[in-house]
Amino acid sequence: MSSLFKPIPQRKFNNDKLRLEALTHKSYCYENPMSGHHNERLEFLGDSIIGFVVADYLYNKYPDYKEGQLTMLRAKIVCKQTLANFAGRLGLDRDLRLGAGSSNSRNNEKILEDAFEAYIGAVFLDSGKDLKCVLDFLEPFVGPLVEELNKPISGTPINLIQGISGLPREKIPLIPGPEDLKLPFSLEHQDPIGKLQTWSLKKGFPIPFYREVKVEGIAHDPRFTIQVQINGMVAGEGEGRNKKEAKKQAASKALARFLNPDPEPDLSQKHLQNFENFGGSDELMCSGPSN
């Protein structure tokens, strides 16, 4: 069996409560209020840890790669489909604690992605916040995939990972194939956040800045509104059940404004020219594709 598909044993935790929290979906807590914390805080932590560790790994492994190549490669590794596959190889799908109403979502790609991020957050805390320990744990996942993505041959894309996640064949996520890496600046293979960042950098603008505008709704069902700004100008606004979803929608709306071949009158070439001439604020901080 290829090392890309082999099951990987879970970590032996010093504090098993961290492992249990990482595997607890919020639906379980709503139905079992005394069960402890759900995994969203660990997911938040793990998302950032994975992004940093993978970036550091790629930076050191490929000293000759340009920023765009490293960004594209990292995006292939930390995307939803790949992290959901990692979760399946760990067997997290079997161990998830879900509410009765979500019991059929055990193989849901988003739930698996979130569980893997939470699990890595738990590994980080359980190791005493040792990033080297996290890298050692992630290397069996990341290393073989990076090697495959960097093969200079076109070949056939990596096969569907059937049997690992238990998903129906038509819904099994693809691990990105090596042919996808040949166009590191192509917009075709990126999610909206990556597309917008590529567009912005090509135009000579800074990396898009994402700002949380408001949070509405109730505690267990919030709605986030996030603006994306480029060069100090609001380019789009999105809503979602979490910040990542809202950021993607904001990026999609910004792309629609500037990539639409037949824009609305207020989004004409004149508007784009005004956008390009707009002076940005030096106080804005950049935000990449995570969260």
Image: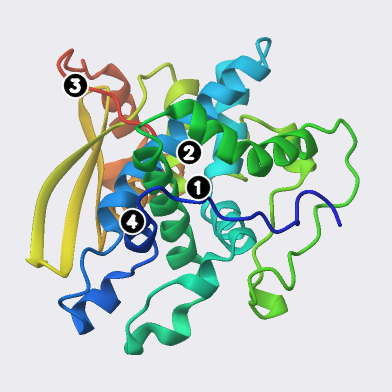
Q: Residue at x 78, y 41 (%)?
A: 178
Answer with the quarter of the image where residue 87 lies. bottom right
Q: Are marks 1 and 2 in contact (CB under 8 Å)?
A: yes
In what element is the residue under mark 2?
helix
Residue at image mark 2: 194
Q: Position of residue 68 (x, y in %)?
A: 57, 23
Residue tagged 3 = 284
Q: Amino acid at mark 1?
A: Asp
Is the N terminus in the top left, top right, bottom left or bottom right quadrant? bottom right
**What residue is disc 4 on?**
245
The kind of residue tagged 4 is Glu
Question: On screen, 137 above or below 80?
Answer: above
Q: Mark on residue 191?
A: 1
Nearer to me, 271 or 149: 149
**Circle 3 crowding by C-alpha within 10 Å: few under 14, some 14–19, many from 20:** some
| In this rendering, position of residue 175 left or right of residue 29 | right
Question: In the rendered structure, are the residues bearing label 2 and label 4 in contact, judged by CB atoms less than 8 Å apart?
Answer: no
Task: Please name the amino acid that badge 2 sits on.
Answer: Gly
